[in-house]
Amino acid sequence: MIYKSTVLKAFKCKNTGLHYGIGGLFSSEELERVAYLGDLGFVGKDVKEIKPEPVIEVKQKETADKPPFKHVGGGWYELADGSRVKGKENALKAIESR
């Protein structure tokens, strides 16, 4: 859970070293830290609880979509084994022959 509160006095957080200006938001995973700064008058006592967004794993596209070679400029193509050939047709032939 992440806790956020509005900054009332500018300060530098001793834990993170970040500077907070008046009107900004202070956030922490520790409710005690936000409450402590609220008692000192640095942040407001209105604390908002925010649930962090779940991390979504993105799968990469299948390699079947991508050609098994890379264009390196000037009509040259680099194959998966590191060798280079000139011309796309020659690159395709080289891959088929392997």
Image (cartoon, rainbow, N blue to C red):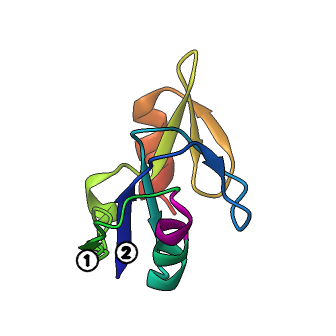
CB under 8 Å between callouts 1 and 2?
Answer: yes
Q: Pick the quarter of the image with the N terminus.
A: bottom left
> What residue did someone put label 2 on?
2
Q: Which corner quadrant of the image does residue 49 belong to? A: bottom left
Determine which of the numbered discs, if any, sits on residue 51 in the image.
Answer: 1
Q: Nearer the viewer, residue 54 or 23?
A: 23
Residue 58 makes an appearance in the image: yes
Number of residue marks:
2
Q: Residue at x 47, y 72 (%)?
A: 34
Q: Nearer the viewer, residue 45 or 87?
A: 45
Q: Position of residue 7 (x, y in %)?
A: 44, 49
Q: Amino acid at mark 2?
A: Ile
Mark 1–mark 2 Cα distance, whole angstroms, equals 6 Å
In the depicted structure, whether residue 30 falls above or below residue 79: below
Q: Which residues are magenta?
A: 37-41
Label 1 crowd bin: few (<14), some (14–19), many (20+), radius 10 Å: few
Label 2 sits on a secondary structure element that is: strand
Q: Position of residue 41 (x, y in %)?
A: 51, 59
Secondary structure mostly taken by the magenta-highlighted segment of the chain:
helix
Viewer-closest of 19 and 35: 35
| Dot 1: element | loop
Indicate whether 26 appears above or below 71.
Answer: below
Going 46% across and 76% down the picture, which residue do you hit? 35
At label 1, the amino acid type is Lys
Q: Is residue 19 shown to the viewer in this render?
A: no
> In the image shown, does 64 or 7 lie closer to the viewer?
7
User: Is residue 47 rendered to the left or right of residue 17?
Assistant: left
